[in-house]
Image: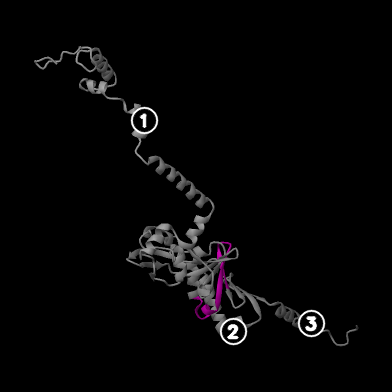
């Protein structure tokens, strides 16, 4: 610089305005999309890509990446070997395990509205066991699982911290048993199948048999009521060919007509009261004809009757 503070260096010096180096930097900056005022910086600063990798990458990143890779491989092997599944089976999900260790395990389940289901059946359907935790239990999922139980009409589930789950349910009312193709199901009053016959808890319900009998349950129950004093002796009703009923009474079949079945039963009640018809050796009573009653005898009674009707041989007849 001279005595007046002016730069007396060559104008072509790099970075000097008007110099060749400055012009090249300006041109490169414009091509790179930088503003013109950044040209001197661009000309005087080395590109970051030109720096050594150890200066561009933070320290310990490589170690962390390698450790993560090994951890992922170890976890994959743990899962693929089946040990994770065994761990979950024995201890529950890891999140549930952590919640239990923190004091939020499910220690009590309060169930209201149980009438015919057993508590263990409700818990199994809900998916709640000793491995569950209150924190991570999804009450909406539990409700959806319980609503898939045919016998449950409605249900609500809520958490009571720290250790309780409350289930309020309403069960459908079973009305009868329905036998079809050898399988006995529990049905509601509208004929909907709501459970399977697994034990004797439904043994006292009326029994209907045959295709479509569940949909005609209301008609069958009306016949039982019309049977009067014979109602308690009716064991089952078979819906025949989708048209009429045959009642099973203590080993005797009562064949009813398609129409006027209640009136036919009233006739049977009178016959039983007056003649003790059902105490005779018969296996079937046919009431399908309005003006007569046809009975079918047991084999022994039929044979005895046939024998009694034989005409005796005349005396003195040659043999």
Residue 176: image location, x then y, percent = 50, 70
Q: Is residue 98 visible?
A: yes
Q: Is residue 134 above or below residue 70?
A: below
Write the start and end of the magenta stretch as one range.
Answer: 226-247
Q: Which numbered marker is on residue 190?
A: none
Q: Is residue 112 visible?
A: no
Q: Is residue 30 above or below residue 154?
A: above
Foreground tag (3 vs 2) = 2
Residue depicted at x 45% and y 44%? 69
Among all residues in the image, which is located at the extreme bottom? 315
Residue 206 shown in magenta: no
Q: Nearer the viewer, residue 157 or 67?
A: 67
Q: Which numbered marker is on residue 52?
A: 1
Res 173 → quadrant: bottom left
Residue depicted at x 41% and y 63%? 132
Q: Is residue 3 above or below residue 102?
A: above
Left or right: residue 257 compared with residue 52: right
Residue 73: image location, x then y, percent = 48, 46
Q: Nearer the viewer, residue 189 or 41?
A: 41
Comes first in the chain, label 3 or label 2: 2
Is disc 2 placed on a helix, strand or loop? helix
Foreground tag (3 vs 1) = 1
Residue 20: image location, x then y, percent = 25, 12
Q: Which residue is mark 3?
A: 311
Q: Rounded to the nearest whole Å, what is the CA distance between mark 1 and mark 2?
A: 116 Å
Q: Rounded to the nearest whole Å, what is the CA distance between mark 3 and mark 2?
A: 28 Å
Q: Nearer the viewer, residue 297 or 37?
A: 37
Comes first in the chain, label 3 or label 1: 1
């Amino acid at each position: 610089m001279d005595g007046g503070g002016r730069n007396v260096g060559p104008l072509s010096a790099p970075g000097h305005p008007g110099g060749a180096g400055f012009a090249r930097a300006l041109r490169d900056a414009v091509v790179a999309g930088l503003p013109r005022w950044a040209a001197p910086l661009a000309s005087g600063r080395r590109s970051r890509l030109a720096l050594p990798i150890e200066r561009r990458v933070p320290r310990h990143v490589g170690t962390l990446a390698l450790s993560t890779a090994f951890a992922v491989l170890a976890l994959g092997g743990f899962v693929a070997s089946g040990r994770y599944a065994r761990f979950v089976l024995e201890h529950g999900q890891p999140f549930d395990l952590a919640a239990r260790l923190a004091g939020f395990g499910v220690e009590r389940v309060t169930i209201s509205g149980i009438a015919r289901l057993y508590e263990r059946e409700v818990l199994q359907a809900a998916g709640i066991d000793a491995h569950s935790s209150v924190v991570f239990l999804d009450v909406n999922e539990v409700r959806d699982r319980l609503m898939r139980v045919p016998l449950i009409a409605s249900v609500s589930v809520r958490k009571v911290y720290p250790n309780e789950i409350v289930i309020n349910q309403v069960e459908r009312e079973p009305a009868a048993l329905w036998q079809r193709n050898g399988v006995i199901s529990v049905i509601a009053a509208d004929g909907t199948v709501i459970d399977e016959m697994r034990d004797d808890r439904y043994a006292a319900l009326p029994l209907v048999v045959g295709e479509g009998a569940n949909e005609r349950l209301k008609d069958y129950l009306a016949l039982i009521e019309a049977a009067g004093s014979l109602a308690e002796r009716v064991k089952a009703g078979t819906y025949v060919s989708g048209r009429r009923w045959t009642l099973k009474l203590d080993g005797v079949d009562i064949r009813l007509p398609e129409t006027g079945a209640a009136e036919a039963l009233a006739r049977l009640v009178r016959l039983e009261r007056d003649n003790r018809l059902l105490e005779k050796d018969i296996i079937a009573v046919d009431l399908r004809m309005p003006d007569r009653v046809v009975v079918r005898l047991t084999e022994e009674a039929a044979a005895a009757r046939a024998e009694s009707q034989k005409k005796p041989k005349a005396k003195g007849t040659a043999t």
